[in-house]
Image (spheres, rainbow, N blue to C red):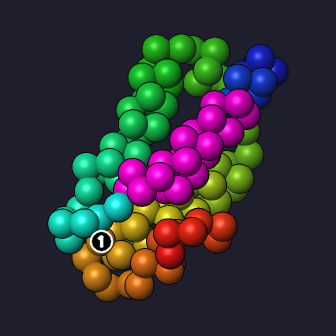
């Protein structure tokens, strides 16, 4: 089961790097005041990959079920909060400042 920990950490790091670079290169810019396809894909693709891995691998499922549920819930809550900020910015409810990375030059 420890092999999944060694796999998950680089995957999360790669996804964070992709999201950071995409933000820095204006990949997620909402020029048309519509909910962007890039933002939707950035939110949905990790969930689809997770669902496929969870459904297809018994050992992956066993590993995830052995983790602390409070930590998993906190991680998903923060993910949902970030997605809510992005949707709120796209709809003009929140200023873009709330949806940007702290070091992003685009805000």
Please name whichever residue, 14 or 46, is drawn nearer the observer in this view of the structure.
Answer: 14
Which portion, as a residue range, is magenta? 9-28
The quarter in which the N terminus is drawn is top right
Identify residue for label 1. 90
Examine the rendered structure and indicate whether residue 69 appears above or below residue 46.
below
Q: Nearer the viewer, residue 92 or 68?
A: 92
Which secondary structure, mark 1?
A: helix
Residue 18 highlighted magenta (yes or no) = yes
Can residue 44 be seen here? The reply is yes
Report the front residue among 76 and 23.
23
Task: State the image coordinates of residue 47 (x, y, percent, origin top left).
Answer: 43, 39
- Rendered image quadrant of residue 94: bottom left
The residue sitting at 46% across, 14% down in the picture is 56
Residue at the far right: name it.
2
Residue at point 50% right, 69% down?
106
**Residue 80 located left or right of residue 102:** left
Up/down of 74 relative to 66, above or below: below
Q: Residues within 10 Å of mark 1 (few under 14, many from 20)?
A: many
Residue 69 rendering spot, x and y as whole percentages: 67, 49
Please give left or right for residue 68 compared with residue 18 in the image: right
Dominant SS of magenta comes to: helix
Instruction: Give how far across and how far down residue 39 sits, in percent.
Output: 35, 53
Residue 36, image x and y in percent? 26, 56
Side (left or right) of 32 relative to 75: left
């Amino acid at each position: 089961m420890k092999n999944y920990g060694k796999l998950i950490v680089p995957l999360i790091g790669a996804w964070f790097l992709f999201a950071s670079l995409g933000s820095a290169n204006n990949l997620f810019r909402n020029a048309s005041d519509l909910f962007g396809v890039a933002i939707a894909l950035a939110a949905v693709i990790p969930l689809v990959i997770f669902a496929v891995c969870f459904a297809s691998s018994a050992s992956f499922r066993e590993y995830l079920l052995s983790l602390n549920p409070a930590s998993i819930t906190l991680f998903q809550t923060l993910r949902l909060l970030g997605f809510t900020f992005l949707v709120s910015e796209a709809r003009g409810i929140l200023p873009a400042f709330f949806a940007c990375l702290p070091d992003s030059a685009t805000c």
